[in-house]
Image (tube, grey):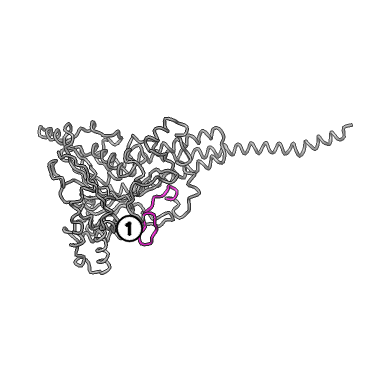
Amino acid sequence: MEQARSPAQVDWHSDAYWQTRRLSPAQLQIHDVRIEGWRNDIGPMLEMKEVLSSTLLPALEKRNRLSDTLRVEEFTKNRSEQHHLRALANEFGWMNCLRSDLVQKTVSDSRDSRLCRWIHISSKFSDYLAGCLLALSDWGKDPQDVLTALHQLEHCIHQNERFSKHGRYFAPFVQDLTDPDEYDEGHSGDRPMLLSIPFLDWTVDDETPPLRFQVDPRENYQSSRSTSHKLRSILQHFYRLEDTSDREAHQVFTKHKPWQTDRALDLKVRRWYGHYPTGLNVDELWILVIDDRHIVTFSSNQSWKSRWPPLQLSARILEVSFRNVRNAFLNTTEPDYTSSTHIVTALSGAMGMLHRSFWTDITLCLSDRYASYLGHLQYRLHRSPSTKLVMDLLQVQEELNIIIQIMDQQLDVVTKLQDMLGPLPNRHSSISGPQGHRLREANTITPSGIATYRQLAFSRLSDPSAQLLENLKREYSDLCDLRENSNALINRTIQLVNIRLEDHGKAILVFTIVTIIFLPLSFVSSFFVP
């Protein structure tokens, strides 16, 4: 096994080449999935390792290769399109150095080979999509297919991008970027594909702490030419054309702070989150599939959160989702990991960010937060029902409706994705005979003893996408139950308030009768009494 070398320190900003580029290697999070033999007691197994930007220096010596060799005149006769392709190649062409067609077969293969390369960008500019697709595609294989994918990508962005008062966003979708006439169902994971899906994440109600790094300096500026998709609160997500600043303080996450009355919970929350989660945001995950060995994901920059516990999306995918999928579904003698598998891994990390079903170690998950607040409101109902309590319950019901609507969209996208990818092969197929026994000892891990974290992802399902759908439906069912409970509490509160108002009305009637009739009579009687 190679000795680990200390990474070299590289000042990327001192190079004039990177000063004029929107993205540099230091701003990307690059991960390789390989078969490694680090653990002698287990044998070879899949591992995901982050690639340090300093190790890319030898490959970056050919950073101008694509922009110098790309002959756009041979692919299109349209002058404006030629200019657009040249601009993309000059801006993003260096990323072609990150591409490699060497697929790892055994542990002893070259370190330049891998099963899959995953690149994560913590910024959401829609023009990044075309740049990454152009730079990471294989132009030597079939340039017309790449050009068709770029056309489909541009059409897909135009069709699904929406305007909002709080920033642009994508409607949830999954789209194959190949020619519709050549579409082959069941093989979409091997072809260019774009997917966008909303997911829930926590934040703080005050100004967020400073970011550890910034990807694009234009992140907070609005422009008609290129605008990032901003992080939005749950109310901004639903009321996209209205100002919600006066209502943000009434969020359930902001109003209800259960750690203030529970010392043990306060210690757990501070140890886990490092901050108090007092806000609920809606983020977007973009997944751009280049081919079966290269995939790029995009999300908002949340680098002020910790990487362990994995509260950033990229860390959550790396540390939790990948291990869940690997340990539960990839225990075979010939483990393979392609872009289609990583789509499910990335979706599991994003959609399960606040859900217990995806990771049981999470502290104060989403359903617990709303269940705790409903319990608090039920206690107030028994003590003193009021119209203010009805308003608080309506706020809970409104937020639950928004969350359930988001989860409906997630279920639709995952179901459509499952139909496009088709069923993945059964990863738990057994191998009989002495030869199979020897292969299992050399190359596989035991199904239950190697789990890195406690998880609920071990099931009898043979497909990770089916497991993802099952976990999502379980959380969806819990939140629907909470919504029904909130509706029942609203009806009960209104009834009790009406009863109280009726009792108050009777008391007022008695007081009025006494004041109008009996008091004058007592005065008259006292006046005539000698």
> Quarter of the image containing the N terminus?
top left
Q: Nearer the viewer, residue 307 or 117?
A: 307
Question: Residue 247: x, y in percent?
Answer: 49, 47
**Is residue 339 at all visible to an observer of this figure?**
no
> Quarter of the image containing the C terminus?
top right
Give amino acid for label 1: Ile
Question: Residue 29: x, y in percent?
Answer: 27, 47
- The picture quadrant where one finds residue 156 is bottom left
Number of numbered discs visible in the structure rendering: 1
Q: Nearer the viewer, residue 507 or 31?
A: 31
Q: Nearer the viewer, residue 119 or 51?
A: 51
Magenta: main secondary structure equals loop
Q: Residue at x 50, y 49 (%)?
A: 246
Question: Residue 431: x, y in percent?
Answer: 14, 35
**Is residue 314 at all visible to an observer of this figure?**
yes
Task: State left or right for residue 504 relative to residue 264.
Answer: right
Q: Residue at x 24, y 36 (%)?
A: 327
- The picture quadrant where one finds residue 495 is top right
Q: Residue at x 29, y 39 (%)?
A: 320
Magenta stretch contains residue 230: yes
Binning the other alpha carbons within 10 Å of mark 1 as few (below 14), some (14 to 19) or many (20 upward) gives: some
Q: Residue furthest left?
A: 435
Question: Residue 3: x, y in percent?
Answer: 16, 39
Task: State left or right for residue 211 relative to residue 494.
Answer: left
Q: Residue furthest right?
A: 530
Q: Residue at x 16, y 35 (%)?
A: 43
Q: Which residue is mark 1?
A: 157
Q: Secondary structure at mark 1?
A: helix
Compared with residue 177, is residue 348 higher up or lower down, i.e. above or below? above
Magenta stretch contains residue 484: no
Which segment is the magenta one? 219-236
